[in-house]
Image (tube, rainbow, N blue to C red):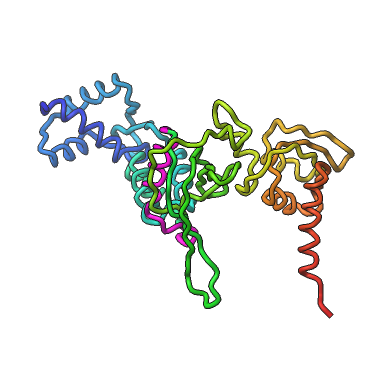
């Protein structure tokens, strides 16, 4: 590549990596940096190259503060966007500590070096909540391939077992399933799939999957085991799942305290119907799964929410409440 063309690209890389509004690079800075790459140039050529980069759409501005120079005013990702991505990676329990650090380092390259240092100082990684499955990237890639090609997968599913001596033991089962979708929910990544032995959907955590293989066997069509046909509706399925418990979808009528209207809208969407009953309560009807997960969701609000219909679901909540009550009964 000609030195002149290489110089223009190097100026772009230097501005992108080292400059921001608080850290502009002067022509002297750029000339000195380019010399490290054995590129000699004059001030006039720096101005010409920056003009060329501007014509290409690079948002490069000139400033006199804190010193005279140039800086990259905007990038593909802005600083708050990179911060959001880093926070998402560090809080994701299915990403191991090692891969978290690797991903954060890559994300830091989306902003200037000085901005990256400030971001790094604000990031905290709770390694206790991170999984130890270093196969997670390969698992995601294999499942993505299987879902696209509509092929079954076979893998080991590892779960922690209870040990009286408090030793870390695990149980492992072999699963062969038809994969339909990947969902990130409740700080975990899940595979929505079907085991041929049953006519329903199953949610499995990706961080527990080991030694996955894509089989040369077509999946069972999801229309046989779910309410969907034509295309698997991931957003609808995710909205109806509670704590990722699978179950039959049904209409549920709730009586709620006015205090939890925001929580109800957060869970079911801003368009959920809220019908006033009196000055302190409202009713709503939602689509939800008939599951223990939904019962747990209802019970977290105590006396602020009541299941009106269906009565069988209301009975499930009542039975759970009675079990908790009995658990705390004092014995004579």
Residue farthest to the bottom, as pictured? 332
Instruction: Please say whether residue 43 is one of the residues in the magenta stretch.
Output: no
Locate residue 241, reporting x and y percent.
63, 43
- The quarter of the image holding the C terminus is bottom right
The x, y position of residue 253, in whole percent, is: 80, 39
| Residue visible at 76% across and 32% down in the picture | 273
In the picture as drawn, the residue positioned furthest to the top comes out as 55
Q: Position of residue 63 (x, y in %)?
A: 34, 31
Span shown in magenta: 126-149
Q: Is residue 3 above or below residue 186?
A: above
Q: Is residue 45 left or right of residue 290?
A: left
| The quarter of the displayed image where residue 141 is located | top left
Residue furthest to the right in view is 278
In the image shown, does 162 or 286 lie closer to the viewer? 162
Answer left or right for 232 relative to 120.
right
Residue 79 is at least partly visible in this image: no
Where is residue 115, by image quadrant?
top left
Magenta residues: mostly which secondary structure? helix
Instruction: Residue lying at the far front in this picture: please name it.
Output: 197
Query: Could one spot residue 63 in this view of the protein?
Result: yes
Which residue is drawn at the image coordinates 67% and 35% (left, top)? Answer: 269
* Residue 32 drawn above or below residue 133: above
């Amino acid at each position: 590549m000609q030195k002149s063309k290489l110089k223009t690209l190097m100026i772009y890389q230097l501005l992108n990596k080292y400059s921001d509004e608080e850290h502009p690079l002067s022509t002297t800075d750029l000339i000195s940096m380019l010399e490290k790459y054995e590129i000699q140039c004059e001030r006039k050529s720096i101005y010409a190259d920056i003009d060329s980069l501007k014509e290409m759409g690079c948002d490069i501005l000139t400033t006199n503060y804190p010193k005279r120079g140039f800086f990259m005013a905007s990038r593909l990702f802005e600083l708050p966007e990179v911060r959001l991505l880093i926070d998402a990676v560090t809080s994701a329990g299915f990403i191991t500590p090692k891969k978290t650090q690797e991903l954060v380092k890559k994300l830091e390259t989306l902003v200037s070096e000085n901005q990256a240092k400030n971001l790094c100082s604000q990031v905290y990684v709770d390694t206790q909540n991170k999984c130890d499955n270093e196969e997670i990237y390969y698992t995601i890639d294999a499942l993505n391939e299987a879902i696209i090609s509509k092929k079954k997968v076979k893998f080991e599913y590892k779960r922690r077992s209870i040990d009286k001596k408090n030793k870390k033991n695990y149980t492992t089962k072999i699963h062969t399933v038809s994969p339909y979708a990947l969902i990130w929910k409740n700080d975990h990544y899940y595979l929505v799939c079907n085991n041929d032995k049953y006519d329903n959907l199953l949610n499995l955590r990706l961080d527990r999957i080991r030694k996955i293989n894509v089989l040369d066997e077509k999946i069972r069509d999801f229309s046989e085991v779910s309410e969907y046909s034509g295309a698997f509706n991931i957003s609808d399925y995710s909205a109806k799942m509670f704590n990722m418990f699978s179950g039959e979808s049904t209409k549920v009528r709730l009586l709620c305290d006015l205090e939890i209207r925001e929580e109800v809208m957060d869970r079911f969407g801003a368009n959920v119907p809220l019908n006033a009953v009196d000055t302190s309560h409202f009713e709503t009807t939602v689509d939800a799964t008939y599951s223990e997960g939904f019962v747990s969701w209802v019970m977290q609000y105590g006396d602020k929410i009541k299941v009106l219909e269906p009565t069988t679901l209301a009975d499930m909540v009542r039975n759970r409440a009675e079990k908790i009550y009995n658990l705390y009964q004092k014995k004579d």
